[in-house]
Image: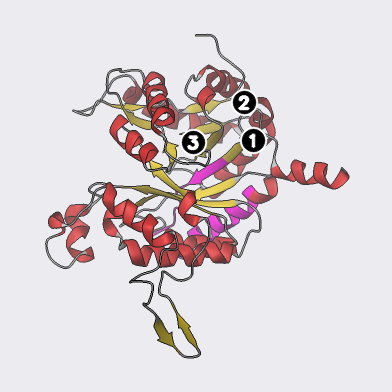
Amino acid sequence: MASRTLDISSLAFLTPGNYLDDDPYSGLEDTLRLFETGERLGYSGAWIRQRHLEHGVSSSAVFLSAASQRTQRIELGVAVIPIGYESPFRLGEDLATADVLSRGRLQVGLSAGTPPHADLLGDLVFDGDWRRYDLSHARVERLRQNLDGRFLGDPDTVIHSPGNVQRPRLQPFSAGLADRLWYGGGSLGSIRWAAENGYNILLGNVTSGEGTDDFIEAQRNQLAVYREAFVGTRRPRIAAGRVIVPTDSADAATTAKYQRYAADRVERTLTAHGPRRTLFARDLVGTSEQILESLHADGSLQDVGELRVELPYEFSVEEYEQIIHDVIERIAPEIGFTPAIDRVTVGADA
């Protein structure tokens, strides 16, 4: 299949938010500064991973609230919150508070199913046997229902607080947040569920084969199902993630480090893994010209308008800064993306 020109309207990056065990502050502060740098460079969005029991952000709502006070324009995302560990109501309160503080910039990625580290963490999260709790997509739906502004009780139900009488609903209510929920889909079943329930969709660099051992074909099949099954009056947002590591402005030692990283991960891309036939995308490590050649040849990216640069876990904040700088300077112009700073300049001159 001949490659086509990409038309990326939204460019974001996803960072792991690493820190040292004995110095979490420095790592979290570095990540907040990376969000600030992304905004200055003109990225559409900056996303954090939510990770439990690891050296990373365990509470995305808290972190994104802090990021909202350090930035003004950039979208603030999380990919993804494992809903199994969350109370759909209490999580809704936290996310709505963060969204209000950001003035409506949150983008919330979610996943269902048994969450990571459940054997270690489940009994600490739940009262009773966590295996008996509903960890399905229905838990995600309950979160959205709590965010959409519906009132609790019947029309006559009110609550009294000092100086106020009101109908009860999740507070603060943040209009539009329920439409900015994303589902991290990696199978045809999860993709179809997200579409039929009107969620935006996040496609990562790991997916299920389901009828093919070709990663790009698998994601194109998922995109076809999503578009066919999507229910809703608004236009859905579809974002694809790829590990992208340009070497253009890196020094020789850093370039060699990047190349070793990629070489160590090639083998996993050569075959399907396990009963779900899990497939991995190749990491795009090299010069901007080499990366652009791969991006333009990626048939699944040609079917989406949003690209998320997934930053590896293993690198330093200085290396992350070099990567996102090279992407915005050397790659973005060739995939149809205009940085937000340029848009502001054009608008001011008009």
Looking at the image, is 122 positioned above or below residue 312? below
- Disc 1 or 2, which lies upstream in sequence? 2
Front residue of this view, candidates 120 and 199: 199
Please, what secondary structure does the residue beneath circle 1 have? Answer: helix
Instruction: Calculate the distance from the C-alpha at mark 1 to the C-alpha at mark 3.
Output: 24 Å
User: Residue under circle 1?
Assistant: 326
Q: Nearer the viewer, mark 1 or mark 3?
A: 3
For marks 2 and 3 on the same chain, the one whose residue lies earlier in the sequence? 3
Which amino acid lies under the numbered mark 2 shown in the image of this protein? Ser
The kind of residue on which mark 1 rests is Asp
Image coordinates of residue 161 in percent, x first then y, are 44, 87
Residue 28 on the magenta segment: yes
Residue designated by label 3: 238
x, y percent for residue 214: 35, 18
Q: Quadrant of the C terminus?
A: top right
Q: Which residue range is magenta in the image?
A: 12-38
Q: Can you give x and y, in whole percent of width and height, for residue 179 in the image?
A: 48, 50
Secondary structure beneath label 2: helix
Q: Is residue 22 visible?
A: no
The residue pinned by badge 2 equals 288
Left or right of 281 in this view: 332: right
User: Could you tell me which residue is drawn at 51 percent across and 63 percent down?
Assistant: 174
- Horizontal placement of 36 versus 56: left or right? right
Total number of numbered labels?
3
The residue carrying pointer 1 sits among few (fewer than 14), some (14 to 19) or many (20 or more) residues within 10 Å by Cα, namely many
User: Is residue 150 at all visible to an observer of this figure?
Assistant: yes
> What residue appears at the point 63 percent right and 55 percent down from the top-left corner?
36
